[in-house]
Image (cartoon, helix red, strand yellow):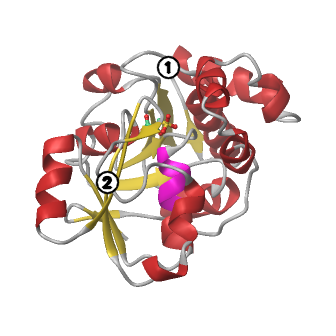
Amino acid sequence: MQKKLIEVCYTPADYEYFKGRFDIIVVIDVLRATSAICSAIHNGVNSVIPVSTIEEAKEYQDKGYLVGAERQGEIVEGFDFGNSPYSYMKPELKGQDIVLSTTNGTRAINIAKDAPTVVIGALTNLNFLCNWLIEQDKNVLCLASGWKDKFNLEDTICGGAIAESLLKTGKFTSNDDSSVAAKYLFLAAKDNYFGFLKSSSHRRRLKKLNLNEDIKFCLTPNSMDVIPILRNDRIE
Ligand code: 3SL
């Protein structure tokens, strides 16, 4: 039986070099967009509509939607909430369709949206997602959201964790050095994500904004058994 592919792409800017060869794209933004989306779906939000720009977010707000918007780690003035996974646990959000726009995560989701399947990955849903991906038996690309088209550690490590888990089954293979390096980073970080990522740029950025609790939450693996999937521009 032919093995399926598992590869890791480090930034949305590199996506064009991978595009077209994969059945499933796993979009990853550990700090914090995809962790927040997992949190929303886990807590009974009906759907999250990911939009790339603040202008699009405003249009939805004018139509009466609840809208989360984050830029540079902070809540954009005039919106209902930002990108903290805790904001999406509020009971009043259950059953709602909400809109989200973030610096990197929602942009990466929209860049990948023409792929056959787009699924949301984070450390918070890691094992559940890996088991689901193994069952699908399809070619998988992990797309790290990075930071403004630059490489970041936490998304790459999460991609490496997924690659390692799929490769271990013997049913997947990978050809690209980006995947090999992501796997090595994961193996170095896996026993202490929090410590390993201490000096990462995004952790420092969020720490300055007093978002340590968010960081701890996002770096704690396997707190949620969810597979958020993009269907017709909505993540459900
Ligand atoms: O870039 C994003 O999409 C965000 O997750 C960044 S932040 O964690 O809100 O700073």
Residue 188 in the figure: left or right of residue 174: right
Q: Is residue 147 visible?
A: yes
Quarter residue 100 falls in: bottom left
> Mark 2 or mark 1, which is nearer the start of the sequence?
2
Task: Indicate the position of residue 75 as horizontal and vertical percent values.
Answer: 42, 44
Q: Main secondary structure of the magenta part?
A: helix
Tag 2, which secondary structure?
loop
Q: Is residue 23 left or right of residue 87?
A: left
Report whether the residue tagged 2 is closer than 8 Å to ligand 1: no
Does residue 1 lie above or below 190 as drawn? below
Please report contact status of discs 1 and 2: CB closer than 8 Å, yes or no: no
Disc on res. 176? 1
- Which of the two residues, 169 or 87, is positioned nearer the viewer here? 87
Picture coordinates of residue 202 (x, y %)? 58, 24
Which tag is nearer the camera, tag 1 or tag 2?
A: 2
176 falls in the magenta region: no
Expressed as whole percent of the image width and height from the top left, the position of residue 225 reads: 64, 69
The region drawn magenta spans 33-38
Name the residue furthest front.
78
**Residue at point 37%, 71% (across, down):** 236
* Residue positioned 80% across, 24% down in the render: 196
- The residue closer to the viewer here, 198 or 161, is 198
The picture places residue 171, in percent across and down from the top left corner, at 60, 48
- What amino acid type should be assigned to the residue bearing mark 2? Phe
The residue at the point 72 percent across, 39 percent down is 212
- Residue that mark 2 sits on: 79
> Residue type at mark 1?
Asp
Image-based side of 67 in relation to 28, left or right:
left
Instruction: Assess disc 1: are there few (<14), some (14-19) or many (≥20) residues with their C-alpha within 10 Å of its C-alpha.
Output: few
